[in-house]
Amino acid sequence: MACVYSRRRMLIGLGAATVLAACGQAAPAATQGAPAGAPAATKPATAGGSSAPAAATSVPAAAGQTKIRFVMSNSQDAIKKWLDPMTKAFQEKYPNIVLEHITTPSTDESTQKILAMFAANDPGEVLNLPATRDYKRVAVRRVLLDLEPLYKRDNFDPNVFAPVARDLTLYCGKYYGFPMHLSFYVTMFNKKLFQEAGVETPDQYQAKGRWKMGVSDDGYLEALRKLTRGEGDKKVWGDQRTNDLHVVNYFLFSFGGKLYNEDRTKFLIPEDPNSLKALQYQVDLVLKEKVYPSSDEVRGLGDTFLAGRRAITKTGHNSAADIQAAAEAGRIDPGMTFAPEGPAGLVPREGPDAIAMPKDGKFRDQAWTFLSWTVSKEGMEYYTRGGRGASPRLDQLQDPSYLKLFFPWEKPEIYLETVKKAKTDVAVSQSEATSIFNREMDLAYLGKKTVLDAMKAAKAEIDPLLEGGERCG
Amino acid sequence: MSAHFTTRRGFWTLGRREAVWAYLFLLPNIVGFLVFTALAVCVAFGLAMTEWDLLVPPRFNGLANYQKLLTNDPVFRQVMGNTAFFVLGVVPLDVVCSLGLALLLNRPIRGMALYRAVYFVPVVTSLIAVSIVWQWLYHSDVGLINYFLTDVGLPKVNWLGSTEWAMPAIIFMSTWKAMGYYAVIFLAGLQGVPEHLHEAAQIDGASAWQRFWKITLPLLSPTMFFVLVISIIRSFQVFDQALIMTRGGPANATMTIVYFVYNNAFVWFRMGYAAAACWLLFIVIFAVTAIQARLQKRWVHY
């Protein structure tokens, strides 16, 4: 039989081929010349991840090189000043390791991204986790690598880190990560606004022993009252409220309060008079004193301190580069001193990011090389120089050559004293507890609930989340 | 050989050949539907009976997720209430405003094409961008809306910062955004209303209102039914504007069911719980649509 290829048959064939092509896989991902055994440079999966896109640098690895991926929060533009020189320095020192960055726009999205990457069984090699919120949230899922064999092998001593930061990365008695920086809690202020209002600056209050809050001689409140003035888009505030449990804990600690019980299985705020007093103090500053803006007043305004519309911000060196930029733009004239003391004294909070490795990550040795270099004195110099946080290493914080990296208006001795006095308290479900806490505090700030009722409602939802504690067993 | 050939020709009748062609053309869509919708729906049904955080294998927990949602989750009750409030607020506004707009746009005046385009602009504008602009319009201190309110002697309203006004604010914005879309549908319906019926009624002395009530509206009822169904389904799925404008706040006042699902699935990684909430949302939408379908026999005139 003669095989006849009619036009119709050919069309059918073409149609079928088109359908198959449409339903089939896309072109295979390029391996970008990676050697056998090296990870393919495919874009990591975003299954179930954030709505915001993650960006990945695409760095080709040549023969003999190994590519490792560093997943972190913040957009590449925002951290370019650190990322580029750090990567260059690392590559020069370790030419056989190629570093690829995967970044997400914000901290929250970063953890979503990291968890989604774990779910896709492709978690990257080195992870930057916000310790105060999500380090334990990831660690409890048993997906991080216990670093002990690696740091013991290389005689790396975790005790070089400031204890408050180091202990945040201690989970069930083991280090699954190390602190990546310090986020001190000090008072940074805009001298311009103090001068305009004719108010003594916080360091002057401090020198007189009056930089205190919640006590009879409340210098902090006195300053806020004088600083808050104006109307509409000319309005200036003294300071503003803090949300989030990992930040508001400064108020709790300073008033002698606490968030959780010993094993972090109970949310204690509604049962602790000092904690309630601390929260009430903040609510009063919004509702009664009106020296903190309501959330609606500052909606969409961005950082009011950097815009020159707020006199005080309580933050750390990690904000110093932005403050310096605002100063260079003429919007502010920065100064710094300790955070205000509460009735229980000066008890700042601390909450650094952590750097960790996935348990089942590839290229363990190369990833450890990068991790340990990042938290080394050399790595931390790049971090600080790049406008990020200060080194978590106590020895480095006392090293005059390192301290030269700070801006002239910063006071390293205050940082050092602050980190020695700082406290922290983080539960496994801190992120979710924070969202519940914030929701209930919103009602207190709107005057629709008392602080006690708000915290009782929060406890009803938070306690079930804390059940089982850190689940170390 | 010849007999075999004849048999094959006999099998491939014109009807069968056309059917094969039809299925071939439909195949990409069918495959897409099966993989990305039907399969996902089936998987979600199974997932809803598990506890799963994406990292450890799912653990079967029967109907525990549904039980918790329905009996022991005050947030879920609140978000269901918020969503119902949004639907009840936005759907009547959508219908009334878009019908009114369509009636205006159906008049034979100069530049009508331009007006139609202008009112459709919000529909094709990114919801994210629109939400950010409206966030500023609603600003209590420097927002344009409060500026006009104070100009006429009314007090400022804390639009997005108060639990009372945040959801109405989102409802107004959503209506403004969707109005153009439904107006176009109504406009198409209006243009299908025979002009001679209006002329005859006019000759008989019917007023404009009577003509609208007795002629236009009944003949527009199939369009109205379509708009109602679509508007209700879309309203139950509201998410973006709450995410951008208020982040579900203050105090969950604008947290909707889809926002709740998003939080549980992609923020807290409780896939089973989120899937169960999705199924409850589906049941609600299905029930409301079924009721509408049943009731339409009474008022829709085809």
Image (cartoon, grey):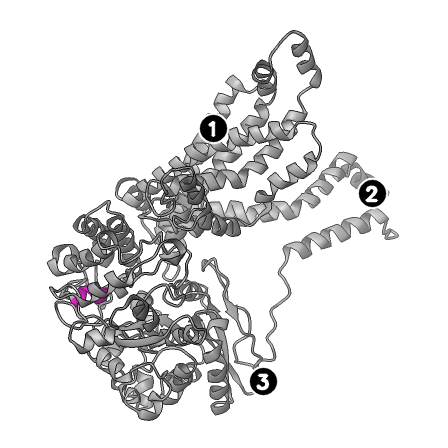
Q: Nearer the viewer, residue B180 or B16?
A: B180
* Chain where mark 3 sits: A
User: Which amino acid type corresponds to the residue marked 2 in the rendered image?
Assistant: Phe
> Is residue A140 visible from the viewing direction of this image?
no
Q: Chain of mark 1?
A: B
Q: CA distance from mark 3 to mark 1?
A: 62 Å
> Residue A125: x and y, percent?
43, 76
The amino acid pointed to by label 3 is Ala
B253 in magenta: no
The residue drawn where x is 24% and y is 61% is A225
Number of other residues with Cα within 10 Å of mark 1, as a class: few under 14, some 14 to 19, many 20 or more? few
Q: Earlier in the sequence, mark 1 or mark 2?
A: 2
Q: Is residue A99 above or below residue A15?
A: below
State the SS at label 1.
Answer: helix
Q: Which quarter of the rendered picture does the C terminus of chain B lie within?
A: top right
Residue B215 spot, x, y in % from top left: 61, 16
Q: Is residue A468 above or below residue B35?
A: below
Residue A467 placement, left or right of B147 = left
> Disc 1 marks which residue?
B290
Which residue position is annotated with label 3? A62
Q: Is residue A292 left or right of residue B147?
A: left
In front here: A215 or A429? A215
